[in-house]
Image (cartoon, rainbow, N blue to C red):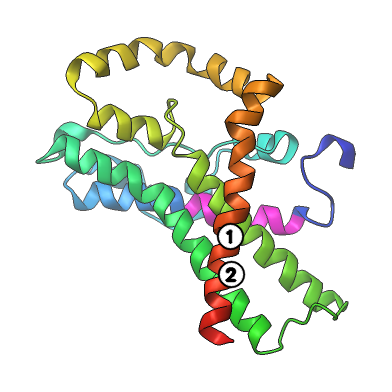
Amino acid sequence: MENFLAFSFEQLPFVLIVIMIAFTVHEFAHAYAAYKFGDPTAKLLGRVTLNPARHIDFFGLFLILVAGFGWARPVPVTRENFSRPRLMGIIVSAVGPLSNLLIAFIGAIVFAALVANGVVDNAETSRGVQAIVLFFNELIRLNVLLFLFNLIPLPPLDGYRILEDVAPRPLRRRLQAIEPYSIFIFLLLVFIPVLNANTIGRLQIWVYEISQSFFDLGIRLFG
């Protein structure tokens, strides 16, 4: 069965915990920002909460485990309720990915502190130490990945919503015209090797570089 999953059985419990945290905080950030800017839509639907049950899409979660990518339940936002729809729309869209980057940063700093103070030793092989290493590895890696992935300018990702709010009206019309085809574009990027290597495949390189820079900063702070 492990062959059908994107993660090993050893990773699986930690991936599930991290995805619950990452998706919940991401969608909460959208909902909370929208509510603070005057849009009660998400609040009325019970989305301004850190309860994972309000944010997790179980089919999207299943796809993450099987294919390595998926989604949470999108937070509905009525931009017309904002006093400055485009500016506040950009902020509401951006806080989701930024919340994942913040989780990764905090996770890397905490992990670096554990390493610097000898709590985690690379020479240790105990189950407790292995669990700590696996948890922080997935916490940092998956949150950086979600940050980068959500900035891809394809609907319904946050990067597209930001681009839509930034773009002038004629360009917005053109962008909206391709929305129905976004899933097919995304599938091409995932399954056509040459396209994957130059787009989504590059995300893994950036994930490593960002994660490592956070960890290195933590080591300098505590070392």
Q: Toward the viewer: 30 or 117?
A: 117
Give percent across and percent down for residue 155.
Answer: 43, 25
Task: Please give the name of the residue rendered at 60% of the width and 63% of the height, measured from the top-left corner.
Answer: 212
Task: Please give the name of the residue rendered at 69% of the width and 38% of the height, measured from the top-left corner.
Answer: 68
The residue furthest bottom is 117
Residue 67 falls left or right of residue 93 = right
75 up-or-down from 101: above or below: above
The magenta segment is: 13-24
Circle 1 SS class: helix
Give percent across and percent down for residue 130.
Answer: 80, 71
> Which residue in the structure is indicated by mark 2?
215
**Res 211 label:** 1
Q: Toward the viewer: 186 or 85?
A: 186
Tell me the quarter of the picture where residue 120 sits. Answer: bottom right
Task: Please give the name of the residue rendered at 40% of the width and 53% of the height, measured from the top-left corner.
Answer: 98
The residue under label 2 is which amino acid type? Phe
Check whether the beta carbons of the residues at disc 1 and disc 2 lie within 8 A of each other. yes
Task: Please give the name of the residue rendered at 65% of the width and 89% of the height, measured from the top-left corner.
Answer: 117
The residue furthest left is 83
Is 19 covered by the magenta stretch? yes
